[in-house]
Amino acid sequence: MGLREDLADPWTGIVAGVAGGLAWAVASASTAAVPLGVGVAAAVYGAKVGASVLARRLGGGRQAEAPGAAALPAPRRGSPAEAWLTRAQRAVRSLGELVDAPTSAGSYPQLAPVRSEAADMVQTMRRFAGQVTTVEDALDRVPVPRLRTEEARLTDAVRAAGSDGLRAERQRALDSVRSQLAVAARLSDARDTLLARMQATALGLEGLVARTAELVALAASAGVDSSADRIAELTSDLDGLRAGLAEAEEVSRRVLDHGH
């Protein structure tokens, strides 16, 4: 993700706004409240963009690979897998900034495990993205349109065969074509399952950021203390997302193993 994407990242604005709002709430008794809030928001916004740029330079523009994921390829540029992975990474970065804010770290230490578990989920998302790419590479090797044409032609040829021997040879060819088409169908199912779970997880993580920002903002500005219930909800949401990832991985494995 480049500088333009960092500036356009919607979660950058949300995190900066929450930080500025917290500073305004703390300083609301003084005449400097508004300038202070604006200044803090601007500082957080600039720090986030700067940190993202620095991280890219130090990391060569690539995210750290999860252990055991080195053999998996990166998602294709501009692909749905890359898009959902990028959104999940942005959400977890924003969640980390909220959790690490001075007011959050001091008042809600229970949020630290939430951030850690969300980061682990991004590692799983990165593995899914690599698996999607691997499946897409395999699909590219199966000429589905040509095979469908050959299936139709061979089906007619089997019916028109004048002898049992000829019919048997043509049937063997037809069975081979149908076997390849079945492989393509299983690969497509596995890809679609993984992409659907990546989408659900990325959207779930974005919702987690929104609810965490709400928790921190309400507690600081309105004195609302429902932190225990809200943090329990966040943890429950994470458990659901984690279970969904595990289920998607198992489903895709069964799809790929079918018929072997």
Image (spheres, rainbow, N blue to C red):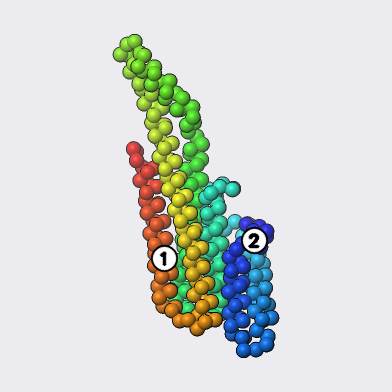
- Above or below residue 93? Residue 43 is below
Residue name at image x 47 percent, y 81 percent: 224
Position of residue 171 measured from the top left corner of the image (x, y, whole percent): 35, 21
Circle 1: residue type: Asp
Checking the image for residue 74, the label placed there is none
Among the two numbered marks 1 and 2 on one chain, the one whose residue lies closer to the N terminus: 2
Helix, strand or loop status at disc 2: helix
In the displayed image of the protein, which residue is found farthest to the left? 164
Which corner quadrant holds the N terminus? bottom right
Position of residue 5 measured from the top left corner of the image (x, y, whole percent): 64, 58
In the displayed image of the protein, which residue is found farthest to the bottom? 29
Position of residue 79 measured from the top left corner of the image (x, y, whole percent): 56, 47
Position of residue 3 measured from the top left corner of the image (x, y, whole percent): 67, 60
- Above or below residue 257? Residue 120 is below
Circle 2: residue type: Ala
Pointer 2: what residue? 8
Checking the image for residue 237, the label placed there is 1
Counting every numbered tag in the picture gives 2
Residues under labels 1 and 2: Cα distance? 27 Å
Helix, strand or loop status at disc 1: helix
- Above or below residue 55? Residue 231 is below
Residue name at image x 42 percent, y 45 percent: 190
Residue name at image x 34 percent, y 10 percent: 162
- The answer, for residue 243, to whether it is visible in the render is yes
Which corner quadrant holds the C terminus? top left
- The answer, for residue 169, to whether it is visible in the render is no
- Above or below residue 159? Residue 122 is below
